[in-house]
Image (cartoon, grey):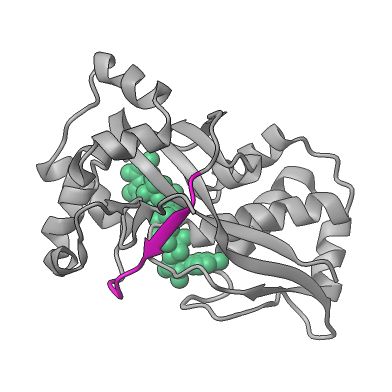
Amino acid sequence: MKHYKAPAKVNIFLKITGRRGEYHEILSRFMVVEQLHDLLYFFPKEEEGFVIDGDFACTTEQNTIYKAYRALLEATGSTELERLMQTHGIAVNKHIPAFAGLGGGSSDAATYLKMCNEVLHLGLDVGELAAIGAKVGADVPFFVYGYPSANVSGIGEIVEPFDEVPLQLETRTPPIEISTPAVYRRFRESFYKELSAEAHDYYAQTDSKTLLSELSADDANDLFEPALSLYPELKEHFRHGWFFSGSGSSFFRPLPPA
Ligand SMILES: C[C@](O)(CO)[C@H](O)COP(=O)(O)OP(=O)(O)OC[C@H]1O[C@@H](n2ccc(N)nc2=O)[C@H](O)[C@@H]1O
Ligand SMILES: Nc1ncnc2c1ncn2[C@@H]1O[C@H](COP(=O)(O)OP(=O)(O)OP(=O)(O)O)[C@@H](O)[C@H]1O
């Protein structure tokens, strides 16, 4: 069976621009980390029920792939989809660390949606798939569109390609499991600020290589300080010249040109 890559991402920068109920509106540059990816494929099975075969720290019902299945079924009512998942399981070779700020679960969910759309000829366009993915998680639309680099805004549902050669990136993931909701909550309680209109264009229009040469890790990611205040042990893992991805725990830096 065909294997599908679910790449990781980093947030070159992540700035808060407002609030939307319990969520926060953001302006963030997402960049794919091609060399770090999960591998997904369908496999025939006899056993009943929705089967996900992979190394996960959660139940099937909590898995973003299962949530993507439910959202796709609700959106299409496809009996072919139901039949596919009765006769086949989904295998995931996990390589993206979880709780790492690298979008592991979101990328798996997006890849699963694209696999079903292709295998079942559902005929959904990328915008329709991204809207279904947005129901699973804020990072899913970026992975559905598949741009190597993009400016992501709204709460993650607005994805605009950014025209640049993606950087070769090195990632490092300290063994600290970070709760994304907790970091956003701490930001809101103790570190709240909004990106100014004049700074908005600098971030949105400057290429990633230049931004990383001009910004500190704190300036680049509004969630870094709240994450440090919640998980002080992170500080031991920070090195000058590295940047913080998403809500963590991963750091990344651009590799020098070969
Ligand atoms: C930190 C990032 O990963 C950066 O890419 C995303 O903003 C979060 O994406 P995610 O992990 O897919 O987030 P979700 O699973 O959708 O939401 C987890 C929790 O994070 C908080 N959350 C998430 C996204 C957002 N724009 N504002 C938020 O406040 C909410 O408390 C939400 O309940
Ligand atoms: N397919 C999946 N892959 C990894 N984690 C998953 C998956 N489905 C559900 N989870 C659960 O989601 C949580 C971590 O999700 P994920 O790996 O996307 O977080 P993350 O690395 O912090 O990504 P993000 O960049 O979105 O913050 C854990 O509780 C994990 O058990």
Q: Left or right: 240 with respect to 257?
A: left
- Which residue is found at the position 62% from the left and 63% from the top? 65
Q: Left or right: 179 with respect to 134?
A: left
Magenta stretch: includes residue 194: no
Residue stretch rendered in magenta on the structure: 167-176
- Which residue is found at the position 26% from the left and 14% from the top? 198
Q: Residue furthest top?
A: 198
In-front residue for pair 177/65: 177
Q: Left or right: 1 with respect to 41?
A: right
Q: Is residue 209 visible?
A: yes
Q: Residue furthest bottom?
A: 47
In-front residue for pair 50/248: 248
Magenta stretch: includes residue 172: yes
- 211 lies above or below 1: above
- Which residue is found at the position 10% from the left and 44% from the top? 190
Q: Quadrant of residue 239?
A: bottom left
In-front residue for pair 144/190: 144
